[in-house]
Amino acid sequence: MPSFSKSKLRDKLLRWWSTPRIFKFFLLRLRLAATYQAVDRYTVLFWAGLVGILGGLSSVLFRRLLDLMAFVLSGRHGSIVEIFSGLPPWQRLATPIVGGLVAGGVLYFGGRWHSRRSSSTDFMEAVVLGEGTLSFRSSIVKILSATFSVTSGGSIGREGPMVQLSSLLASMVGRTRKWSVAQRRLILACGASAGIAAAYNAPIAGALFVAEIVVGSIAMETFGPLIFSSVLATQTVRFLADSDPLYVIPPFHLQSGLELFYYLALGLLAGLVAPWFLRALRGSEKLFTKTCLPAYLRLALGGLVVGVLALRYPEVCGNGYSVVTGILQEQWLWSSLVVLLLLKVTATSASFGSGAVGGVFTPTLFVGASVGYLFGHACEGLGLGGLPEPGALALTGMGMVLAATTHAPLMAIIMIFEMTLDYQLILPLMLGCVLAHFTALGFESGSIYSASLKRKGADYAQRQLALLKVGGLMKSDPARVRPDAPFNQIAKHFVLHTYQYLYVVNEQGIYLGAVGLQDIKQYLGNSFLDNLIVAQDLLTDGPPIIHYSASLEEALEKFSHYTGERLPVVSDGPSPRLLGSLGKTDLLLALAERVPAAEGQFADQTKKG
């Protein structure tokens, strides 16, 4: 047995040394490249998973911090609505005012402490427009301000600061690594998806939220790490806290196909209501801005509005979670809910418009649940038959209004399913969310989040990027061969360079295709084929081409569907001549450098206007 093993080893060594040296180096390079690519993919997942665990931990700790602060401020335990219901009238009025004053003071005076660098404090801006990093000091100021706004009864969600904290931790991880702008943006997006997943116990919806709304792509290169991060964040929360669905609801069933018409009508209604809800939020923001008050007085004014409403209806305080639970359990009279819905929208507009740091995700769910519940009672009052249960309409209404305000219907469908784990209503939910989305688009093309990026200059920056052309960024004179180039010449090209494709052109320089590094492995080691196989025999379509006059926006779209590093650049016209190649890294760096400049020009134009 040993002699047999030695003879096999000897034969392998003889074959190795008999192989031309050029092929030895080539085989070694192929193996190293494959190993590096596999390790690189696993590395991305490792850091995404770490960010997910950190996001889950931070969400649990932040919730406990909010509970502790609410107890310190009121001396009571329970939800914000329960706490305010037990307070005397003067405290119901004073608590939101004092909380707004302190929260605004943190923003006002914290602005003098935070870093003056160009780092963003908004995770969506940092992923879409920035360099994938968040300002640590500014983020801490926002999170601290949010704790006072939320615990003092502000009509705003706690998911905002939770996502901010998770994104900040992801940004800190990105800063410790020598990553490109694209990699830092991806890891920051993983932090945001982890925060959303941990806040709502919804890992798939958390990843879809970031993919649909922020990144704008569900390509597996980005969606895979987002899912990995979201799942680990959710599992961390379930391990440390609880694993129950966010909303516990009675079982609902689709009794007949005729009920689908009611869900379609509700989807149409949700698509009509959502734009007005968005306009109420933006209109309130403009009104508070016109006051020209400092942040602490502006937030105190918003707290005054909430406090006055809470004197009679303490349910307007907080994010509305407990009221939504009551609606799903059908514990509300329709007449009382009509008044509460109007007052809740007013309170949310006051908190949001005054500049309170927080989220409007859960208040949006409140609006959707109320619209669905009232729609059911209205149909019942008209004497219509075959009605779904009001609780079922409330549940689907949550998803429909969410889809109409975010313009992300897929995320809304998955979000409602994950928060309730009720599959029975998934079909009417799908129909209603899609109809609500398209209905809302007819009245309001922007979503609740696109307005934020628009204010920061995203539209202007995108217009500037559309003016830039590939020709100004490409590298000329890429490696090329003629169709009759022998195999040994092709192999030498691949050994001496690190590219994955060798471009093939004819005598006139017309681009014909490419020879791939992986396509020639089967011919290695056969020296008698060196002059028999030519480039024409190995020719493939290669990577997608891009024209010289194409914009960088078009190039970015090409790369979103191609995993390679470089694209061949050809001339315009029917006979594409090979002019150069465009690298993905060069493109991302150009975008990262150009967007901040465009933002600055946008700010200058805004001041002049």
Image: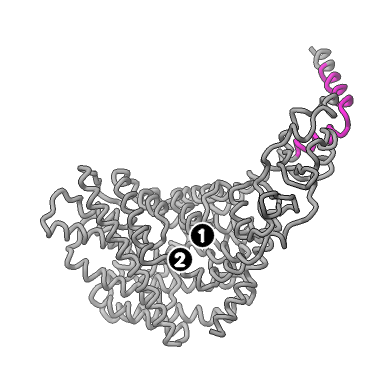
Please name the amino acid that badge 2 sits on: Tyr
Residue 363 seen in render: no
**Magenta stretch bounds:** 8-32
On the picture, is 210 further left or further right than 252? right
Question: Magenta span: helix, strand or loop, mainly?
Answer: helix
Mark 2 packing: few (<14 Cα in 10 Å), some, or many (20+)? some
Query: What residue sits 57% from the left and 59% below the top?
Result: 188
SS class, disc 1: helix
The residue nearer to you, when weighing 451 against 245, is 451
Which of the two discs, 2 and 1, labels the residue nearer the N terminus? 1
Q: Amino acid at mark 1?
A: Val
**Rendering quarter of residue 474:** bottom right
Counting from the top left corner in percent of width and height, residue 437 is at 37, 58
Count every numbered label the image shows and give the total. Answer: 2
As drawn, the label of residue 449 is 2
Residue drawn at point x = 45 percent, y = 87 percent: 293
Residue that mark 1 sits on? 214
Is 404 left or right of 144, judged from the image as shown?
left
The answer to whether the residues at label 2 and label 1 have Cβ atoms under 8 Å apart is yes
Residue 11: give x, y in percent of width and height.
Answer: 84, 18
Towards the viewer: 90 or 138: 138
